[in-house]
Amino acid sequence: AQSVTQLDSHVSVSEGTPVLLRCNYSSSYSPSLFWYVQHPNKGLQLLLKYTSAATLVKGINGFEAEFKKSETSFHLTKPSAHMSDAAEYFCVVSDRGFGNEKLTFGTGTRLTIIP
Amino acid sequence: KAGVTQTPRYLIKTRGQQVTLSCSPISGHRSVSWYQQTPGQGLQFLFEYFSETQRNKGNFPGRFSGRQFSNSRSEMNVSTLELGDSALYLCASSLPYLAEYNEQFFGPGTRLTVL
């Protein structure tokens, strides 16, 4: 069975400071990992995805995440927060392969940006 | 290319009624998944359809059902509505042939309120 744990339900950072959103995963097989963002009253947008090609994954809007198999972690980072980054962020895991379209979501981390 | 569309965007029903939600996937996508999002339970997988067949199913009662048409459009139905069915229902589509990872594209959701 697959699962993800987002270690912080709420993170607050000042504008211009680094962002760190933490995620640990559990998967029986080689997983696919994603970070999605959800702005208020909006659908989910994919920030970045992990394949087996590279452990450091770069996404949109300056976000990146590093896959660490030994730590079963996939933390999301951004060097400098912007006001527009305020949103809910979801770490997501899926077993890789055809027929495994089921996504398992973490409980989400609400990111607040302080002006 | 148009994104995933969901209709209606908002719906108000009363207990005991039934409801049908519609999802049109991105052109060329043949897999459609449905998710329920509530403040208490977060994002939970309902089911996934591929080539008009339900291929994966989450842990929801039989009141929740779905189907997929030959053009890949999908509908989900909830019968005998309960107050707890109030939620944002999200539809996602994907290209299931990308076995390396299963990126899903989400629609804006249908907000269902049960009174």
Image (tube, helix red, strand yellow):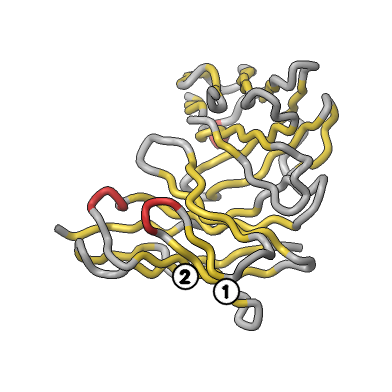
- Residue for point 64% across, 18% down: B20
Q: Nearer the viewer, residue A72 or B57?
A: A72
Tell me: residue A47, above or below residue A44. Answer: below
Amino acid type, callout 2 = Arg
- Tell me the number on the disc at residue A73: 1
Q: Is residue A94 left or right of residue A115?
A: right
Residue B113 higher or lower than B8, as above or below = below
**Residue A53: percent from left, percent from top:** 66, 64
Q: Which of marks 2 and 1 is nearer the N terminus?
A: 2
Residue B36, how many percent across, how many down? 59, 39
Tell me if B32 is positioned left or right of A6 in this view: right
Q: Do the residues labelled 2 and 1 touch (CB within 8 Å)?
A: yes
Mark 1 belongs to chain: A
> Most extreme residue toward the bottom, as rendered?
A70
Q: In this view, does A36 lie above or below B70?
A: below
User: Does residue A110 appear left or right of residue B100 in this picture?
Assistant: left
Residue displayed at 80% across by 52% down: A97
Q: Mark 2 lies on which chain?
A: A
Q: In which quarter of the image is the N terminus of chain B?
A: top right
Query: Farthest front residue?
Result: A53
Q: Residue at x 52, y 32 (%)?
A: B86
Say which of B85 and A79 sits in front.
Answer: A79
Mark sitting on residue A22: 2
Would you place residue A71 above or below residue B48 in this image?
below
Q: Which mark is residue A103?
A: none
